[in-house]
Amino acid sequence: MNYSTFKALHSKKSFFVLANCWDVLSARIYEKAGYKALGTSSSALSATNNVKDGENITFYTVLHNAQNILKVVKIPLSVDMEKGYSSRVTDIVDNVIKLADIGCSGINIEDSQISGSLQSPTNFSRIISLIKSTLLAKGFPHFVLNARTDTYLSPYCHDKLTETMARASVYKSAGADCLFVPGLSNLNEIREISDEIALPLNILNLPNISNIDDLQLAGVNRFSLGNSVFDEMLAYLEKSINRTIHNKNYASHYSHDPLNLLFN
């Protein structure tokens, strides 16, 4: 049921906020708050495993984390696949199918390389095409394939606006269901891209974004929280621990509203 539910959220005429979680507890809190869908954050999951973001965790870690989350939530879960966790296209496809098999509703996969440069649109579209055709052959027609382009993050991409729109067209033809453009935040550029491309547009939460109503009016369809909530939580944890080790007021750790978490 979640496959079709998640797919239905992705439309040029709709808007939703994707809550990015990193473990079972964060997923349950988001669901309890009323979010419609979840996505994992590779940055947050990497940090909890004491490594930097950038495929320094294994696909097994990603898969096991998704399995645990799916045991306790009812809303759709999409997984951050980074670059696919393999240099072999067949392995990348197998990884996606493993996620679909356990009940995930989608993935995002990026066109950047370890060096920071971008794969050619042709090469990346081949990956998208093979993933999509395999999903269809395996009976997952509603699984959402979110193509992430790092045109706005790569120092090697100079005409970011034009390149983004060009890649959107190629990726859609290959079978992508949504275009994810992290780093994009200028409302005029958002509007121009959204008006030009046929895919729903996904952007990432950034410090200079304060009004999601403006984003929706500009043509954003999916707004991802990314690692922002995890980073905020981690900053609070560090501040709180450093405060009490100096002032010795450990009772202050209880100066919060009662926790209302239900455990299965």
Image (tube, rainbow, N blue to C red):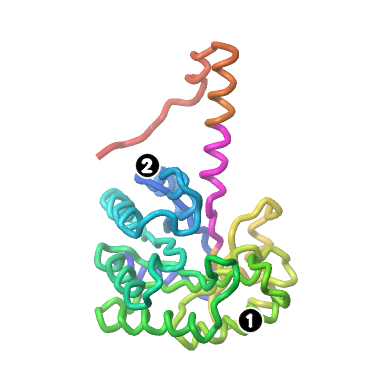
Give the Cα separation between the discs numbered 1 and 2: 37 Å
Instruction: Report the predominant secondary structure element of the magenta stretch.
Output: helix
Residue 232, magenta (yes or no): yes
- Residue under pointer 1: 165
Residue 191, magenta (yes or no): no
Q: Residue 65 vs residue 201: left or right?
A: left
Amino acid at dot 2:
Leu
Question: What is the total number of numbered labels drawn onto the structure image?
Answer: 2
Q: Residue furthest front?
A: 115
Q: Which quarter shows the C terminus?
A: top left
- Residue under pointer 2: 25
Answer few, some or many: residues within 10 Å of disc 2's Cα (few below 14, many 20 plus, some between 14 and 19). Answer: some
Q: Which quarter shows the N terminus?
A: bottom left
Mark 1, mark 2: which one is toward the viewer?
1
Element class at badge 1: helix
Residue 189: percent from left, percent from top: 72, 72
Quadrant of the rendered structure where residue 3 is?
A: bottom left
**Which residues are the magenta region?**
223-236
Q: Residue 239 vs residue 259: left or right?
A: right
Residue 257: percent from left, percent from top: 48, 26
Residue 31: percent from left, percent from top: 40, 49
Quadrant of the rendered structure where residue 179 is?
A: bottom right
Residue 86: percent from left, percent from top: 38, 68
